Image (spheres, rainbow, N blue to C red):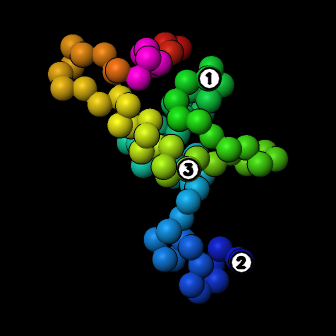
Amino acid sequence: MPRDAPGNLQEAGMRKYVRRKEAAAYLGIAEQTLSRWAVVGFGPSMHKMGRAVSYSIEELDRFAEARRVRSTSEHPRNGEGDAPKT
């Protein structure tokens, strides 16, 4: 179904996957940060279809939830450690 077709999943608010730019905005980070994380194997898992990369909303929520902390001195409990420094 074309993206702009009436009644599609996007219009219904039921999009399952978003592109990197939208995923970065959803997480509140720069698109370049998400790209860099993908190269080094950090961040939310993604789907690659040809050259197109997309992220499931469910995975973005899971990644964000795993990084929840109560203070700035706390480290995320997800076992991934801190984001890579570049």
Q: Which residue is disc 2 drawn over? A: 1
User: Can residue 40 be spotted in the picture?
Assistant: yes
> Image check: 15 left or right of 48?
left
Q: CA distance from mark 1 to mark 3?
A: 17 Å
User: Relative to the observer, which residue lies in front, 77 or 4?
Assistant: 77
Q: CA distance from mark 3 to mark 2?
A: 19 Å
Q: Is residue 46 above or below residue 13?
A: above
Q: Are circles 1 and 2 on residues that touch, CB within 8 Å? A: no
**Dot placed on the residue nearer the N-terminal end, 1 or 2:** 2
Q: Amino acid at mark 3?
A: Ser
Find the residue positioned furthest to the bottom: 6
Q: Which residue is disc 3 drawn over? A: 56
Confirm whether the magenta stretch covers residue 16.
no
Q: Residues within 10 Å of mark 3 (few under 14, many from 20)?
A: some
Confirm whether the magenta stretch covers residue 82.
yes
Q: Is residue 2 above or below residue 67?
A: below
Residue sitting at x 59%, y 78%:
8
Residue sitting at x 59%, y 86%:
6
Find the residue positioned furthest to the left: 71
**Magenta segment, prevailing SS (helix, strand or loop):** loop
Q: Are circles 3 and 2 on residues that touch, CB within 8 Å? A: no
Per the image, label 3 sits on a secondary structure element best described as strand
The magenta segment is 78-83
Number of labels in the image equals 3
